[in-house]
Image: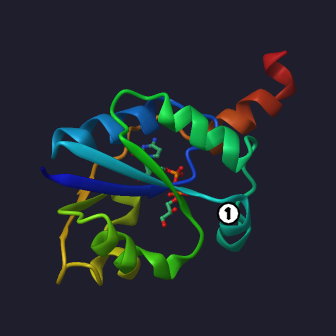
Amino acid sequence: MKKILTYGTFDLLHIGHIEILRRAKELGDYLVVAVSTDEFNAIKGKKAYYSYEDRKKILEAIKYVDLVIPEEKWEQKRDDVIKYGIDTVVMGSDWEGNENFECLRDICNVVYLPRTEGISTTMIKNDLGDKKLK
Ligand code: C2G
């Protein structure tokens, strides 16, 4: 069984998230998603609209996803790869070359997939907050 792992906040779920999860699953048989806790998001300088618990439940409802685990710190990735027997870590291209992932290449494959253009959680928040849309 080929196991895939990906990380993210996955707030205000949108097609870009679905597309990375769909393509990540295509690379194997079992997809583990490590979703950032609210505390880790604070470290990343992000504040999600949905709580960790809600983002976890939403991800668990997606047919491509087999297991959702918490992402609590940058340093857990190596342990995650070993603990879950991961073959490939997949991230969107905005993470290409990032040391948090490049450092895993001695124990698993690391694949960056093109981001889905024209959508992001930040864009959604900005557009919904834009008075002109009301
Ligand atoms: N993504 C994408 N296309 C978009 C938006 C996001 O492919 N239009 C991908 C990102 O590249 C990432 C995943 O969807 O691989 C989740 O994106 P975010 O929820 O924004 O996650 P991020 O804040 O990048 O957190 O340790 C890694 C971090 O937890 C990643």
- In the rendered image, which quarter is residue 85 located in? bottom left
Q: Nearer the viewer, residue 105 or 129?
A: 105
Q: Residue at the top extreme?
A: 134
Q: Looking at the image, which residue is at 40% across and 59% down?
A: 94
Q: Looking at the image, which residue is at 34% across and 74% down?
A: 101
Image mark count: 1
| Left or right of 124 in this view: 33 | left
> Residue 35: where, in percent of width, then height?
54, 54
Residue at disc 1, CB closer than 8 Å to ligand 1: yes
Q: Residue at the left extreme?
A: 1
Q: Is residue 119 visible?
A: no
Q: Nearer the viewer, residue 25 or 125?
A: 25
Q: Secondary structure at mark 1?
A: helix
- Residue denoted by label 1: 41
Q: Is residue 36 above or below residue 97?
A: above
Q: Nearer the viewer, residue 53 or 19?
A: 53
- In the rendered image, which quarter is residue 104 located in? bottom left
Q: Is residue 114 above or below residue 102?
A: above
Q: Is residue 79 visible?
A: yes
> Residue 62: where, in percent of width, then height?
43, 29
| Left or right of 100 in this view: 59 | right
> Residue 111: where, in percent of width, then height?
22, 60
| Left or right of 109 in this view: 12 | right
- Residue type, mark 1 in image: Asn
